[in-house]
Amino acid sequence: MNTRISVLQTALAAAMLFPIVSTPVSAADVCRTIGDATAKIWQVPVHLYSSETAAFYGKQAKTSESIYTSSGEIFVMVSGRWTRSRMTIAELKAARNEGKETPKQTCSYVRDEAVNGEAASVYSRHAEEEDFKTDMTVWISKSRNLPLRSESDMDVGGAMGKSHRSTRYEYSNVQPPPGVK
């Protein structure tokens, strides 16, 4: 159950990045640029490192790691131990897209900035869906057109309230965790 929750939390964070397809001119074009770049995490091996704070977690940040492999497998760190997810990348994509409409959103280019020495364009995205609102900042590599970092604030209202998630994306030497079957 914890594995599925971690995978779905990671998917939700990724889904907040996705919506639409290029050259920043209009807000819709910027949203397409963000969507195109972030959709690539489904296509290339990536190691995601996330930290989330939320009222329902208490005062301590919850950290998580996920690895998406080129073979479509997902590995998730749960309670300090790696495990293979029962969901594949294809199933995760399908679940994310199920009955989903493009949210009402606005996107904008913010500035250029380096992330670990790599040139990146920084974009912001505000999205409103029926159940929640999200404000996200994403750093996209200028040379690889892949997300390098993201910061998101989500407000789902009620007892769940607000949360903040920081994610770092690593693409070098991504391998399944040793010994995990």
Image (cartoon, rainbow, N blue to C red):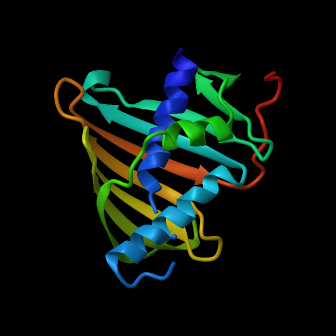
Residue 66, x across and y down, in percent: 61, 36
Looking at the image, residue 38 lies above or below residue 52? below
Looking at the image, residue 95 lies above or below residue 168? above
Residue at screen point 43% across, 81% down? 24
Residue 50, x across and y down, in percent: 49, 40
Taking the image as shown, residue 93 lies to the left or right of residue 34, namely right
Kindly tell me whether residue 22 is visible in this rendering.
yes
In the picture, the quarter occupied by the C terminus is top right
Residue projecting furthest to the bottom: 25
Looking at the image, residue 111 lies above or below residue 17? below
Residue 89, x across and y down, in percent: 66, 40
Dividing the picture into quadrants, the one containing residue 59 is top left
Residue projecting furthest to the top: 1
**Which of the pair 131/80 is nearer the observer?**
131
Taking the image as shown, residue 43 lies to the left or right of residue 136, namely right
Dividing the picture into quadrants, the one containing residue 85 is top right
Residue at screen point 44% across, 41% down? 99
Residue 8, x across and y down, in percent: 50, 31
Kindly tell me whether residue 50 is visible in this rendering.
no
Number of marks in picture: 0
Residue at screen point 67% across, 49% down? 46
Residue projecting furthest to the left: 158
**Which of the pair 49/70 is nearer the observer?**
70
**Which of the pair 59/123 is nearer the observer?**
123
